[in-house]
Amino acid sequence: MTLTVYRVEVDRKKCIACGTCYSSGSVLFEPDGAGYARVVGGKTDELRSFRVFNDENMETASSTAGYCPASAITVTEGEDAKSK
Ligand code: SF4
């Protein structure tokens, strides 16, 4: 069985702290102390927050990305997800 590898990233320079991603029930995102989004369990700095996953949350991540008003969330699938 081949697992889907994908990377979820928040561009923290674009994020406007609207809360849509982490208020929607998604387990993938959470706010930092100022309300800006980060990926749960991911690596976070002032520029970005990201994590590579190997499970089936792809659809959730992609739909949440579509709701972000700042287009700050990207989801990359496949081997490219690991090499960024
Ligand atoms: S939906 Fe987008 S702009 Fe809003 S908090 Fe999440 S990443 Fe930031």
Image: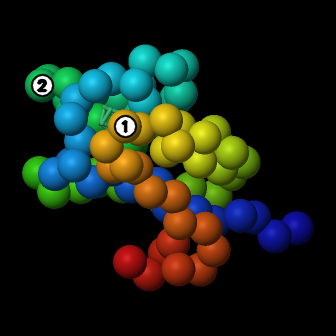
Question: Which residue position is annotated with label 2?
Answer: 34
View quadrant of ligand 1: top left
Q: Which mark is residue 15?
A: none
- Say whether residue 69 is visible: yes
In percent of width and height, residue 67 lies at 49, 35
Ligand 1 within 8 angstroms of badge 1 C-beta: yes
**Toward the viewer: 20 or 46?**
20
Left or right, 69 with respect to 62, comes to left
Quadrant of the image occupied by residue 33: top left
Residue 59: where, in percent of width, then height?
A: 69, 45
Q: Which residue is mark 1?
A: 69
Task: Give neighbour class at mark 2: few <14, some 14-19, many 20+ (Cα, 10 Å).
Answer: few
Which residue extends farthest right? 1
| Mark 1 or 2, nearer chain start | 2
- Measuring from the top left, give residue 80's x and y in whole percent: 53, 80
The quadrant the N terminus occupies is bottom right
